[in-house]
């Protein structure tokens, strides 16, 4: 799987080849237009539903209706500003993964961004795509002038391991922060990373 930059309206990182498939990581121009926009929302909604079905704690408890997921993405993308970046990884089958960063609105924290909704479809996991998306979003954040990134995730999850492996600083956990897929209160881990 070769991961390379998409349409170079804004440059995106080229990362190491990992197998023989082709996956492109693209910076999405927002707001998306017409049918292109519908396809993007559909693909992102499918990813979110797949993540919830896989037991991930990504804002939604219980089975996630596809229409609710589409509406969530529609509303979220509608509020994107010029310091926010959405990345989408695609192959010939469609969208395989996504992640976004949002620049903080506070005028005394314009250098800080929050990384959100790192999602890789189950059919594409454990091949390095999550890591490649993080490489790319950190690079895009730098291009936006962000020098401090923060995020949180379910403790003891694959994402928790991934951020530690990437050198993010794990501040600690808040117990019972959200409900896990089985309804059990579960801790969240909080991270930050200074970009150099
Ligand atoms: C977290 C998530 C994005 C990781 O995506 P991914 O593409 O599987 O990530 P990677 O492939 O980079 O790494 C995952 C694992 O695969 C391993 N891996 C990477 N490339 C590999 C390869 N070529 N062969 C075998 N294993 C490989 C990594 O070492 C890592 O192992 P570990 O979890 O045992 O430490 C994905 O599991 C996901 O979407 N989860 C649900 C949503 C979620 O929780 N998101 C986080 C919100 S904050």
Image: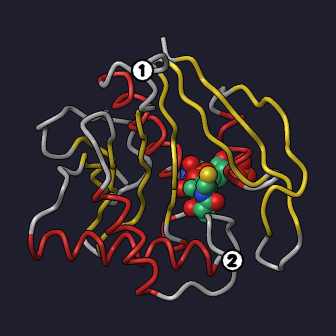
Q: In the rendering, at what x and y percent does residue 104 appear?
A: 45, 32
Residue tagged 1 = 107
Q: In the rendering, at what x and y percent does residue 159 appear?
A: 67, 50
Decide which of 26, 45 is in the foreground and name it. Answer: 45
Q: In the rendering, at what x and y percent does residue 160 appear?
A: 73, 46
- Label 2 residue SS: loop
Front tag of 1 and 2: 1
Q: How many marks?
A: 2
Decide which of 10, 71 is in the foreground and name it. Answer: 71
**Quarter placement of the N terminus:** bottom left
Q: Ligand 1 falls in which quarter?
A: bottom right
Local crowd at mark 1 within 10 Å, few (<14), some, or many (≥20)?
A: few
Image point (27%, 42%), residue name: 81
- Of labels 1 and 2, earlier in sequence is 2
Quadrant of res 107: top left
Image point (56%, 17%), residue name: 194
Residue 61: numbered disc: 2
């Amino acid at each position: 799987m070769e991961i390379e930059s998409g349409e170079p309206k804004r440059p995106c990182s080229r990362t190491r080849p990992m197998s023989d498939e082709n996956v492109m990581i693209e910076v999405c121009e927002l707001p998306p237009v017409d049918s292109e926009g519908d396809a993007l929302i559909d693909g992102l909604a499918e990813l979110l539903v797949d993540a919830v079905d896989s037991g991930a704690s990504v804002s939604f408890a219980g089975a996630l209706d596809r229409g609710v997921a589409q509406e969530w993405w529609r509303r979220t993308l509608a509020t994107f500003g010029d310091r926010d970046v959405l990345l989408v990884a695609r192959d010939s089958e469609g969208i395989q993964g996504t992640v976004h960063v949002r620049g903080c609105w506070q005028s005394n924290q314009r250098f800080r961004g929050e990384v959100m909704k790192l999602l890789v479809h189950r059919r594409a996991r454990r091949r390095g795509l999550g890591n490649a998306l993080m490489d790319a979003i950190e690079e895009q954040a730098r291009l936006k002038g962000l020098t401090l990134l923060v995020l949180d995730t379910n403790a003891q999850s694959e994402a928790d391991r991934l951020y530690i492996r990437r050198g993010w600083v794990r501040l600690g956990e808040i117990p019972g922060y959200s409900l896990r897929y089985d309804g059990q209160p579960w801790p969240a881990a909080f991270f930050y990373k200074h970009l150099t």
